[in-house]
Image (tube, helix red, strand yellow):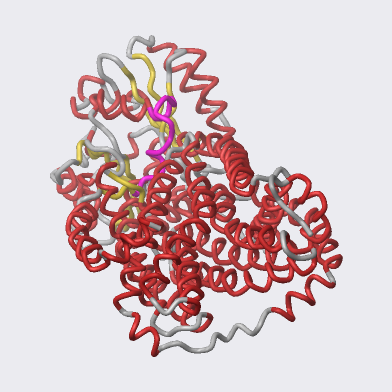
Amino acid sequence: MKFSRFIVKYRIAILLLALILLVPSLIGFINTRINYDMLTYLPQDMDTVKGQDILLNEFGKGAFSLIILEDMPDKDVSALRQQILDVDHVDTVLWYDSIADIAIPKELLPEKIYNVFNTKNATLMAVFFDSSTSAEETINAVDDIKNITDKKLFISGMSVMVSDLKNLCEEEEPIYVTIAVVLSCIAMMIFMDNWIAPFLFLIGIGFAVIYNMGTNFAFGEISYLTKALSSVLLLAVTMDYSIFLWHSYKEEKSKNTDKKEAMATAIKNTIISISGSSITTIAGFIALCFMSFTLGKDLGIVMAKGVIFGLISCITILPSLILVFDPILEKTDHKSIVPDTGKAAGALTKIYPVFLILFVALLVPSLYGYRKTNNEVYYELGESLPEDMEYVISTSKLTNDFKMGATHMILTDATLPDREEREMLERIGKVKGIKATLGLDSLIGPLVPVEMVPQSVKDVFENDKYQLTIIASEYNTASDAVNAQIDEINKIIKDYDKNAMIIGEAPCTKDLIETTDTDFKIVNIFSIAAIFVIILIVERSITLPVILVMVIELSIFINLGLAHFTGTSLPFIAPICISTIQLGATVDYAILMTTRYKKERAEHSKRDAIITALSTSIPSIIASALGLFAATFGVSIYSDVDMISSLCTLLARGALISMCCVILILPAMFMLFDKVICKTTLKMKSV
């Protein structure tokens, strides 16, 4: 109680300190870099990642793009190439006039090479940048190229996708927060018993959100997904704490006329009641840190830190706000639309076998759908963008007009004999789906002496350590066909140089697929084990952790299984995140009911204890679940970024499914296993 009374006594000072701390937090928030390139989170020891570093460090080339020019005379294309070459951080621009005068017919190029780069009315230009794919310098250079002429340019490549994604997210992110705040506020105003309290909840959480975003400066950068989702998620998963404090304060105030003493007691009760639930939520996010694909670590650390800030805000800032505004709060009470739940609880426990049968009936099909969904996710990062984005349009045009999908690059030892290199490229050229192999020899053809090739072109393909070959594939990134193609190419190049590497977007994405497949299993096991142990310690029971985790896991199976049954393709990150976040965030509902059940069971019969636990928990569970639903559903409808929209859809749906499972199935489990629970729970008394 000393801590609680301290908060109550120094409530004004706490609010002033909270306001002062906003200043450095906002400065940190503004100066935290945002990373829009998902592939940078791959493990650094992979050949694809090492190869990208070699390309940048040894050749001075990082990002790579192809530009499509339509209905443009050769002399204008040549002039435009020079303009693009003059853009800051553009290292090399390869087109026909890079190796020959435009007065010489392009048909002198080897036929296969000519067909790769030309159609009847269009030509391709290859651009290398001297900075990495997602570097600010590259993004600025892409934007400059787009604005260099009033004629339509179609630019493909990862940097273009990053540029489009950045522009879209910066436009949408403020609206995400606005939607989440407005809808959460409306939901709480309706389902709670006060018109003003929800605004105070949001102000308290708002402090936590800003502190959390500001302290991200210590990491240097965070991913765009973390930035876009962390505020909405933090609002959603910590709203419970505010609701618990409010209900406790109202209950204590009805017993004690001294509102300060009532609040001190409420703070003490809240700390006890939310300690277990907050730890399980944190554990869910910490589980993401065990992914070798470090986007999980990025999101996990930020969200775990945010939950801690949310918890601190709930027991310091929010009580201070409630006490300051208490006179207004007393005048704005209203009757909640949630009816008396006593009769409903009695009816539900009376027909509990129905819900046990429902549990068994849902388990098999939902588990089947869940496993299918995990195998049906997509990895093509561009698929998360709307169809009218420049990157999507350019990529489609490249595929449809030039029959080109992914572009690979091969790095081999510079000492590899010419004969072996030609033999290697000849074998690669015969691999199914390869459109062309573009090395220095194949590019210039037999009619152009090597001595006539400009040094700038030679520098693209070779230096004293490495030789670079560009491979044009007909297959799209992340497809089964291109992954099989990469495996076959890898076997060929290792026959000639055991240290050879194949790099590019498609090889990186292939590594992403293999990495996240393993990550999913590891994160799932860790999150379930961690939350199981936490519940075991908090509830001091062997059976209760099993029951609680089973109920929430069923809701996760149903949630993700619905994606399969409705034919919805999800981004690869969605199942990993949802499995841990939904478990960590909504197991709170089950812990709340379980704690009350244990307390009541010491004084009442099995059925009476379960009815009381259910009836008293339903209002808080409904308010919390609808808060999570409201915070995420609006964003899922609004967002044009499928990566964000899909995650929010799953979170919104998962909140409702978990709510139903806890209210309907968990009490049935208590009814069935009551005797076992009493015997396997430490110091649990039963009458």
The image quarter containing residue 331 is: bottom left
In this picture, is 309 found above or below 450?
A: below
The image quarter containing residue 133 is: top left
Residue 652 belongs to magenta span: no
**Residue at image point 34% right, 45% down:** 66
Q: Position of residue 454 (x, y in %)?
A: 19, 27
In this picture, is 434 found above or below 387?
A: above
Res. 387 in view: no
The magenta span reads 36-49
In this picture, is 429 found above or below 95?
A: above
In this picture, is 423 found above or below 652?
A: above
In the picture, measured across the screen, residue 333 lies left or right of residue 94, that is: right
Residue 46 belongs to magenta span: yes
Q: Position of residue 431 (x, y in %)?
A: 56, 29
Q: Position of residue 303 (x, y in %)?
A: 41, 51
**Residue at image point 65% right, 45% down:** 540
Res. 218 in view: yes
Q: Looking at the image, which is closer to me, 325 or 432?
A: 325
In which quadrant will I find the N terminus? bottom left
